[in-house]
Amino acid sequence: DFTVEVVVTGPLNPNTQCIMDYSALQRRLRKSIIHEVDHKFLNDLEMFADCVPSAENMARIFFERFQATLPKRITLLSLTLEDREGAATIVTGAP
């Protein structure tokens, strides 16, 4: 069991005063990461073919995959992967 938290930055939409619609952000996260790993044996997944699915590797790969799905105007600042015990791995990117 893991929790994924993302932090993004970008220009505010003048109509909504939001960087990005929260539900759109959630859909992108589910499509690019969650659907692929949910209830799966991680060692069998293609995204971990070249590495062990440790929390650090998972967070790094998730960061890269999710960042690639965002519009050009949106920057992924960080992705936190937290397990049920409260331990977390944080991957950050340059703003």
Image: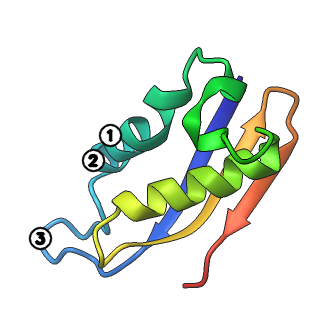
How far apart are labels 3 and 2 at the CA level?
16 Å
- Image quarter of the N terminus: top right
Q: Is residue 21 left or right of residue 47?
A: left
| Residue type (three-letter) at the residue carrying disc 1 | Arg
Q: Which image quadrant for residue 64?
A: bottom right
Residue placed under numbered mark 2 in the picture: 24
The 10 Å Cα crowd at callout 3, few under 14, some 14 to 19, many 20 or more, is few
Q: Residue at x 41, y 43 (%)?
A: 32
User: Which sits in the foreground, 21 or 30?
Assistant: 30
Q: Is residue 38 left or right of residue 66?
A: right
Residue placed under numbered mark 1 in the picture: 27
For label 1, the SS is: helix
- Image quarter of the C terminus: bottom right
For label 2, the SS is: helix
User: Which sits in the foreground, 87 or 34?
Assistant: 34
Q: Nearer the viewer, mark 1 or mark 3?
A: 1
